[in-house]
Amino acid sequence: MAYQVLGVKRIEGQKKDGSGAFDMNQLFVRVPIEQAAGKIKVTGFGFEVGTMEIEPGVIPKMATVQFPAELELETEQKFIFGDFRSVVVGFRVPAKAVKAA
């Protein structure tokens, strides 16, 4: 699926309590604001920033991408913090986004 990718970020270090290391990897995409009604009402128009988990090994490959960029993201379902989440494991530039030389 193609997304407008705004950027990627990796935050790593040691936990304050000394219990170990952490490594958070996020990809930021432009997503439409969705209307919702029920216990919580959401009203809006346009777009907002959505986040996705990304494998750490994919981040260095993003260094050559000029953001914002339209990319097709390859995802896999992974079990993270007791929940299944879509994690970006690869990407490619869609054929229509590649400029002719």
Image (cartoon, rainbow, N blue to C red):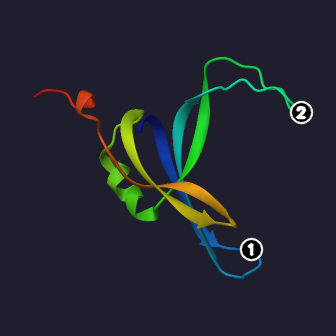
N-terminal-most mark, 2 or 1: 1
Residue that numbered label 2 is attached to: 39
**Residue at figure coordinates x 36%, y 58% from the top left:** 60
For this rendering, which residue is in front, 100 or 75?
75
Q: Nearer the viewer, mark 2 or mark 1?
A: 2
Q: Is residue 61 above or below residue 64?
A: below
Q: Position of residue 41 (x, y in %)?
A: 83, 26
Label 2 element class: loop
Few, some or many residues within 10 Å of mark 1 (<14, 14–19, 20+): few
Q: Position of residue 98 (x, y in %)?
A: 22, 31
Corner quadrant of residue 61: bottom left
- Distance from Cα at disc 2 to Cα at disc 1: 37 Å
- Label 1 amino acid? Lys
For this rendering, which residue is in front, 87 or 4?
87
- Residue 16: mark in rendering: 1
Q: Is residue 25 above or below residue 12?
A: above
Residue furthest to the left in view is: 101
Q: Position of residue 21 (x, y in %)?
A: 62, 76
Corner quadrant of residue 34: top right
